[in-house]
Image (tube, rainbow, N blue to C red):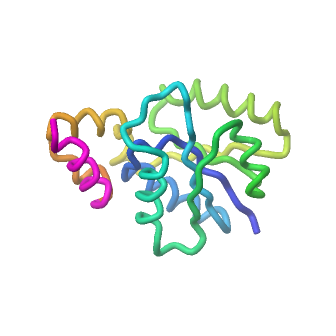
Amino acid sequence: MRKVLYPGTFDPVTNGHIDIVLRARELFDAVVITVAINPGKLPLFTVAERVRMLKYCFKEYDNVSIDSFNGLVVDHAHEVGAVGIIRGLRAVSDFEYEFQMALMNKKLAGDINTVFLMPNEKYTYLNSSIIRNLASLHSDVSEFVPPNVNAALKEKFSKS
């Protein structure tokens, strides 16, 4: 079984993330979506909330699993038995950073390959930061995120 790891903060998960996972399912036997614990970021949602939202989004896919990790992505890839890491590229501006990360990951773990996937063009401008900002201003983000995520965002910002 060829398994791939899709790491990210997913704060929150967007339709662009969903699109990347669906594309990865076409290339690999199994996809492990892993919520990264990044001490350098102050997330809106807890790790448990993000995992729960992702599990709901992919509940009908038996070859998609969700977990979380703290540490090096390549170490976690080895832990779950992944042969590669999926990274989404929305625009050329993403490439330089992702390319550097892919080269470092290859240096750290030569047996783990990074696969870059582009989302559908209708999602190329989406990112979680923009979604959080729009939602904090009570803008309708329902076309950018799954319904459960939209509800969670409304609840988070209903007090502001």
- Horizontal relation, residue 79 to residue 34: left or right: right
Residue displayed at 42% across by 65% down: 56
Residue displayed at 59% across by 49% down: 68
132 up-or-down from 80: above or below: above
- Horizontal relation, residue 28 to residue 131: left or right: right
155 up-or-down from 31: above or below: above
Q: Residue 28's quadrant in the figure? A: bottom right
Residue furthest front as drawn:
159
Question: Between 120 and 63, which is closer to the camera in this rendering?
Answer: 63
Question: Which residue range is magenta in the image?
Answer: 147-160
Q: Which quarter of the rendered picture does the C terminus lie within?
A: top left
Percent coordinates x, y for residue 125 in the rendering? 34, 37
Q: Which quarter of the rendered picture does the N terminus lie within?
A: bottom right
Percent coordinates x, y for residue 124 in the rendering? 38, 41
Residue displayed at 64% across by 29% down: 99
User: How many callouts does the rendering have?
Assistant: 0
Identify the main secondary structure in magenta. helix
Percent coordinates x, y for residue 129 in the rendering? 35, 33
Residue displayed at 74% across by 34% down: 105
